[in-house]
Image: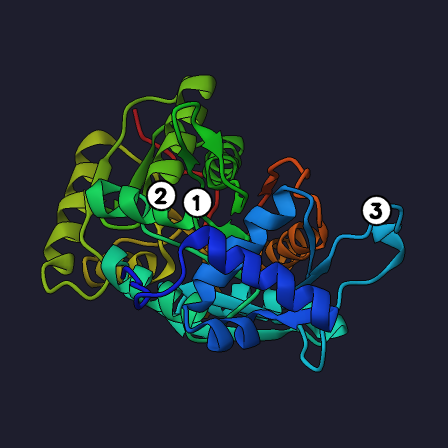
Amino acid sequence: MTVSDPPGPLPYERRAQVVDLLRRRGVVRVNDLAAELDVSVITIRRDIALLASQGVIRRVRGGAVLHEPGVDDDAAPPDTGDRALSVGMVVPSLTYYWPDVIRGVRAAAGPSSARVVLRGATYQADDERRQLAWLVESMAVDGLLVAPTTTGEEGEALVRWLRSAAVPVVLLERAATVGPYREAMESVVSDHTLGAAMAVRHLATLGHRRVGVVTCAESPTTPHVRRGWRQACEELGLAGAPDADTVDHGHPSLPEALDEVLDACLASGTTALLIHSDREAIALVERCQARGLRVPGDLSVVAYDDEVAELCDPPLTAVRPPKDSVGRAAFELLAARLADRDRQRAAHRVVIAPRLIVRTSSSVPPARSG
């Protein structure tokens, strides 16, 4: 969404008004300036950012003060007025995977009494941009934590919008580069490639020589899981096995797709599968039971996500992404960015390793006669 200001002073005249108000009042708040000058909050934030880069003023949390030469900026804490730090957060789901990330953010924000304003989106770039614009322009948040769509023309446009936002941004479980030099945006991600490779190595250690993979075609995690599976299979010299990129749990054709996977396992002698995510893994176990195949006796199964894997019968061995840690690290990264008054801090890309939780769905492969 593009915000258009009503006719008014030219930009340089408006910035002069900002400086004049600072001289008279000492400290001004972003929201107060926007209301007094009859422009959007995002316009005022951009003015303050420009004036701060020129050394005219100093940014403080929620507003600005005049820059006074000789004053030790680090000795004075950011001015917060009568409100705590406000962080906007947009994630694609409030029911699966993301609740643990949200809890991590809130746990990290707690000691500072920061306010987290949460919005749920729908894996649609235009919806995500609408939610983000509302947080910046209407809620006047100090920074954004977001898991945006990054692919396709709309996703690429959203990334450019985030890069030019008037507030600091940290990406959650996404990574992106922008500009002619492909500069990295700040991000915190799980190392899904490593997690998938850990699952394959676990199965190979048990003696499996054919390990297949089943992923959901529409999941942003899928490329990383498949990369880790492929790299580990090549490293360990494992033979070819079923490689299925299928529909998600709610699709009516999932049972038929899983039957095709099981047929391919039986035809190729595959004895183990890595499946993303838990719900699809549980559905496959149910198909095995309906067809008289034993898990793990005939087929070992490892799930990726570990949301509900232990509730399956049998409980599923699973890779657990560090969701809580991702949330904590993202908030800490954003707080550090907000504390960087001179905007000299290098962009950080944090990668956190998942864990492998071994349960009863994985065991040694069945003995082959002959």
- Tell us which disc is closer to us: 1 or 3: 3
Q: Residue at x 40, y 55 (%)?
A: 10
Q: Residue at x 32, y 61 (%)?
A: 128
* Direction from residue 281 to residue 71 in the image, left or right: right
Q: CA distance from mark 1 to mark 3?
A: 30 Å
Q: Are marks 2 and 1 in contact (CB under 8 Å)?
A: yes
Which residue bears the numbered disc 1?
Answer: 163
Local crowd at mark 1 within 10 Å, few (<14), some, or many (≥20)?
A: many
What's the residue type where badge 3 is placed? Pro
* Direction from residue 203 to residue 346 in the image, left or right: right
Instruction: Tell me the SS state at disc 1.
Output: helix
What's the residue type where badge 1 is placed? Arg
Local crowd at mark 3 within 10 Å, few (<14), some, or many (≥20)?
A: few
Q: Which disc, if any, is residue 9?
A: none
Residue 122 sits in quarter? bottom left
Query: If you read the primary sequence from the N terminus, does the residue marked by circle 2 or circle 3 appear first?
Result: 3
* Position of 166 relative to 274 (above/below): below
Q: CA distance from mark 2 to mark 3?
A: 35 Å
Q: Position of residue 58 (x, y in %)?
A: 71, 54
Which residue bears the numbered disc 2?
Answer: 160
What's the residue type where badge 2 is placed? Arg
Q: Is residue 344 or residue 239 the one in the foreground?
A: 344
Q: Position of residue 14 (x, y in %)?
A: 48, 59
Q: Position of residue 294 (x, y in %)?
A: 32, 54
Q: Residue at x 42, y 65 (%)?
A: 90
Which residue bears the numbered disc 3?
Answer: 69
Q: Is residue 138 or residue 329 the one in the foreground?
A: 138
Residue 87 sits in quarter? bottom right
* Position of 124 relative to 369 (above/below): below
